[in-house]
Image (spheres, rainbow, N blue to C red):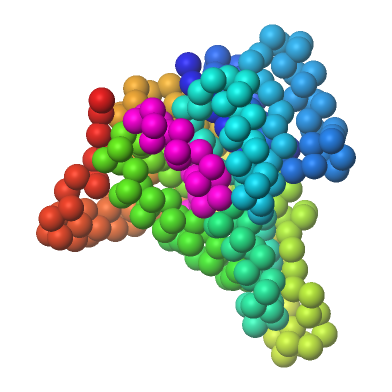
């Protein structure tokens, strides 16, 4: 079993994944911001669960918007467990609204959390993984780089950037024995705080007024997303936690580079296959075959 650090574990997919992995026998460090204040309740619930079910489940303070916080979290895990095998990048925040209505600073903030937070934690964890010559970076991404829905512009940008960052990082770390897994959940309108806590542009009267003709479309965004599911489908994000647990039960080196968990029948697997073939051919013709495969000790 592995020692796992997961971000954004206060709610939603991160919380479900922390529970599922701990129940599967992994040593899990569920990280979150403000574990002693704003997120004290979910932190305490995880502590209770660990005690009741005798799970190797721990809560760690980690704000992905801070390099210092990421460094401290990884150091705390290494001090407590002596090792770190798997880093799960899950923390993220949704934003809805017309793209022009967001200031550049507002979009930058979302990228800072959803994309650069990944970079901060990788910079904190990779020195240990590189020294060990072994490890797994697992990214909870999105089908959004393929589906690209409207009225979520800054979020789409941040998740597409995160996906690209995961991909190019895999080139660097694969020859050093570190594998990459990108789990791509489709849309989920229940079981997470994404829609209820989504950010919106501060400008609600200026630029946004120029898009009033689109307000009826934007207003039914969540309902339109729900309409993608086949009637009767139980769109519970626990299936993402189950897929992550399944993947980490596979032998090292046999885990998929991408795994789509999509209940909206959006042809993402087909798109991924076409892009993979083109990218693999391109990199091979450059003469960089070795960055496409995880080295094994």
The residue depicted at 59 percent of the width and 56 percent of the height is 114
Q: Height in image: 287 above or below 184?
A: below
Q: Quadrant of residue 9?
A: top right
Q: Hey, which quadrant is residue 240 in on the image?
A: top right
Kindly tell me whether residue 163 is visible in this rendering.
yes
Residue shown at 73% from the left, 78% from the top = 215
Question: From the image, which quarter does the C terminus lie in?
Answer: top left
The answer to whether residue 226 is visible is no
Residue placed most toward the observer, 269 or 265? 269
- Is 186 within the magenta? no
Residue 193 image point, x, y percent: 73, 48
- Foreground of the two, 266 or 36: 36
Instruction: Tell me where residue 47 appears, x and y as whole percent.
Output: 77, 21
Between 158 and 130, the one lying in front of the other is 130
Q: How many numbered badges does the structure rendering display?
A: 0
Residue beneath the point at 27% across and 53% down:
276
Q: Which residues are magenta?
A: 118-143
Q: Position of residue 35 (x, y in %)?
A: 79, 36
On screen, residue 36 versus residue 294, left or right, reads right
Q: Position of residue 119 (x, y in %)?
A: 51, 52
Q: Is residue 266 above or below residue 173?
A: below
Residue at image coords 25%, 34%? 295
Q: Is residue 136 magenta?
A: yes
Position of 252 relative to 150 (above/below): above
Q: Nearer the viewer, residue 164 or 126?
A: 126
């Amino acid at each position: 079993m592995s020692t796992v650090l997961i971000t954004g574990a206060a709610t939603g997919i991160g919380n479900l994944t922390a529970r599922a992995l701990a129940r599967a026998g992994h040593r899990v460090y569920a990280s979150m911001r403000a574990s002693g204040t704003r997120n004290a309740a979910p932190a305490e619930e995880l502590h209770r669960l660990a005690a009741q079910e005798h799970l190797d489940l721990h809560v760690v303070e980690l704000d992905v918007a801070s390099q210092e916080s990421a460094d401290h979290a990884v150091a705390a895990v290494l001090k407590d467990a002596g090792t770190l095998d798997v880093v799960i990048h899950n923390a993220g925040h949704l934003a809805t609204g017309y793209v022009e209505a967001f200031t550049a600073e507002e979009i930058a903030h979302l990228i800072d959390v959803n994309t650069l937070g990944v970079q901060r934690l990788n910079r904190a964890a990779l020195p240990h993984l590189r020294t060990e010559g072994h490890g797994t970076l697992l990214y909870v991404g999105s089908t959004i780089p393929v589906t690209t829905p409207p009225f979520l512009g800054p979020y789409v940008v941040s998740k597409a950037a995160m996906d690209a960052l995961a991909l190019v990082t895999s080139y660097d770390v694969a020859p050093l024995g570190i594998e990459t897994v990108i789990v791509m959940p489709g849309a989920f309108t229940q079981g997470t705080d994404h829609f209820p806590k989504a950010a919106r542009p501060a400008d609600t009267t200026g630029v946004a007024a120029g898009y009033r003709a689109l307000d009826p479309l934007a207003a039914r965004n969540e309902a339109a997303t729900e309409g993608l599911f086949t009637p009767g489908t139980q769109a519970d994000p626990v299936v993402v936690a189950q897929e992550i647990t399944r993947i980490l039960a596979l032998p090292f080196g046999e885990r998929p580079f991408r795994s789509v968990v999509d209940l909206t029948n959006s042809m993402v697997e087909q798109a991924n296959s076409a892009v993979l073939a083109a990218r693999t051919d391109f990199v091979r013709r450059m003469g960089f075959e070795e960055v496409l495969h995880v080295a094994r000790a």
